[in-house]
């Protein structure tokens, strides 16, 4: 089970193959020709017999259950073949040279310290990045969820676009486009977190095992994950925005569209970073999903759409400043309505006399309490908002890269715990030799235990 592939074995400098009784059957470079000569022999059909992987060549040829008691088995033949090979003679010669040049006992510790690397990891950071990235790319393309995310983004773009496609250039249409901006922000943040959490928990099990063996740095693995998740985030945001933006009739012009797209990409990054933090802190996927749903719902509540910033209770108004949705909503609203006009109901005087006229987009933004604080021009506020969204993603990832290592000691060996194969019995005969409240096997214990097991059921 789980035999290494040829691609993995080729990364080894040398491989060691032991027989069932501990005899070396091969020790040398990953050379298929030499392996074939040891385990199959130099026969005419050796290449035909070597039709599988290197692991199959090594394991299936000499290793078998019957070879232990058979002195003429393929296993013993492989051991003998290796002992007579030039490779073994060269190995013995190298060991003799090492022994002859070895320092005295008193100098051995100093020589060993000089010989051993002072680096924590045997591979450089560049090498770690290349290996982890190659593995991550394979997992991304093998994962069906990768293609499902593209389909989901396309479907949501079509649904949202068709939902708001009949808006007019009036006050009602302005409210509808405000809802479209808010819904796009909320959906992107929710979907990015929802698809990152399951994948993160699947990868966490492997990560903990690799990190426990110190194969590579946890920070390198985290950074690689962030960088390789970014292309899919850009694709998702591009699909949702390109399908729905012009369909809804948003502000024309490349500058308006690319600001809208950049804001959604920033929210994608925030959602994924937020999910990675929850993965680091949560023991189970269920708890991470619950926390994600509740916190994103809180983000949306104080995002500034309904209620607007000024209508939020002053006690909770500060939450708007630590919520990425509020920055995204504010920036995209300014991007859409600043400097525009549209038809609406205009109040003439205090008597209620009204007339249909034009509404200034800047006045509409002021009615929505946007910007929340006028510390500069609307363009400056818009730039600041998109900058803060990416800062949220950066800060969350900095928290995640730190706590993914800290919490590894909390959860390692506490995930995927095997189910108990025994159960507690509270109805034991006190006169028997069994210990009270002991653990017994299900069913008839004597019938389940073989005679040669070496212990009796009452000893359990």
Image (cartoon, rainbow, N blue to C red):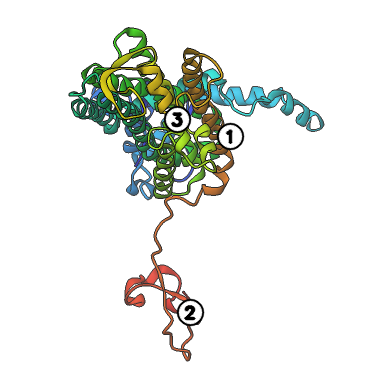
Tell me where residue 117 appears, x and y as whole percent: 66, 24
- Per the model, the C-alpha gap separating discs 1 and 3 is 27 Å
Tell me where residue 173 appears, x and y as whole percent: 25, 24
Disc 1 to disc 3: CB gap under 8 Å = no
Residue identified by numbered label 2: 437
Mark 1 and mark 3 lie on one chain; the one further toward the N terminus is 3
The image quadrant where one finds the N terminus is top left
Mark 2 and mark 3 lie on one chain; the one further toward the N terminus is 3
Q: Is residue 23 left or right of residue 340?
A: right
- Per the model, the C-alpha gap separating discs 2 and 3 is 59 Å
Tell me where residue 194 appears, x and y as whole percent: 35, 38
Residue identified by numbered label 1: 402
Residue identified by numbered label 3: 326
Q: Nearer the viewer, residue 408 or 357?
A: 357
For discs 1 and 3, the disc positioned in front in the rendered view: 3
Q: Secondary structure at mark 3?
A: helix
Residue shown at 34% from the left, 13% from the top:
340
């Amino acid at each position: 089970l789980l035999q290494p592939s040829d691609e993995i074995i080729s990364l080894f400098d040398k491989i060691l193959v032991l027989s069932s009784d501990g005899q070396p059957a091969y020790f040398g470079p990953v050379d298929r020709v030499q392996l074939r000569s040891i385990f199959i022999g130099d026969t005419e059909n050796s290449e035909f017999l070597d039709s599988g992987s290197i692991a199959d060549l090594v394991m299936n040829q000499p290793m078998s259950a019957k070879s232990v008691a058979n002195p003429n088995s393929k296993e013993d033949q492989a051991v003998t073949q290796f002992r007579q090979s030039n490779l073994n003679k060269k190995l013995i010669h190298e060991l003799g040279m090492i022994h002859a040049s070895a320092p005295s006992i008193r100098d051995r510790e100093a020589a060993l310290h000089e010989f051993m690397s002072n680096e924590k990891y045997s591979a450089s950071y560049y090498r770690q990045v290349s290996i982890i990235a190659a593995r991550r790319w394979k997992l991304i393309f093998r994962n069906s969820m990768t293609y499902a995310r593209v389909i989901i983004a396309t479907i949501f773009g079509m649904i949202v676009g068709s939902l708001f496609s009949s808006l007019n250039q009036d006050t009602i249409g302005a409210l509808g486009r405000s809802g479209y901006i808010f819904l796009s922000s909320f959906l992107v943040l929710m979907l990015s977190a929802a698809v990152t959490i399951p994948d993160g928990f699947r990868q966490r099990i492997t990560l903990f095992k690799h990190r426990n063996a110190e194969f590579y740095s946890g920070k390198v693995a985290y950074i690689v994950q962030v960088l390789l998740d970014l292309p899919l985030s850009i694709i998702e945001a591009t699909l949702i925005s390109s399908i729905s933006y012009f369909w809804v009739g948003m502000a024309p012009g490349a500058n308006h569209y690319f600001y809208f797209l950049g804001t959604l990409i920033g929210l994608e990054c925030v959602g994924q970073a937020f999910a990675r933090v929850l993965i680091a802190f949560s023991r189970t996927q269920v708890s991470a999903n619950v926390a994600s749903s509740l916190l994103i719902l809180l983000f949306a509540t104080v995002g500034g759409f309904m209620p607007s910033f000024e209508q939020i209770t002053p006690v909770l108004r500060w939450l708007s400043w630590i919520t990425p949705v509020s920055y995204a909503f504010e920036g995209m609203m300014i991007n859409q309505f600043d400097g525009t006009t549209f038809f609406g109901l205009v109040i003439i005087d205090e008597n209620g006399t009204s007339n249909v006229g034009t509404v200034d987009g800047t006045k509409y933004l002021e009615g929505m309490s946007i910007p929340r604080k006028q510390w500069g021009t609307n363009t400056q506020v818009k730039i600041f908002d998109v900058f803060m969204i990416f800062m949220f993603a950066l800060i969350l990832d900095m928290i995640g890269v730190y706590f993914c290592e800290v919490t590894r000691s909390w959860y390692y060996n506490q995930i995927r715990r095997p189910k108990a194969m025994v159960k507690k019995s509270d109805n034991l005969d006190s006169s028997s030799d069994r210990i009270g409240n002991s653990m017994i096997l299900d069913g008839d214990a004597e019938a389940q235990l073989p005679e040669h097991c070496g212990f009796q059921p009452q000893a359990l």
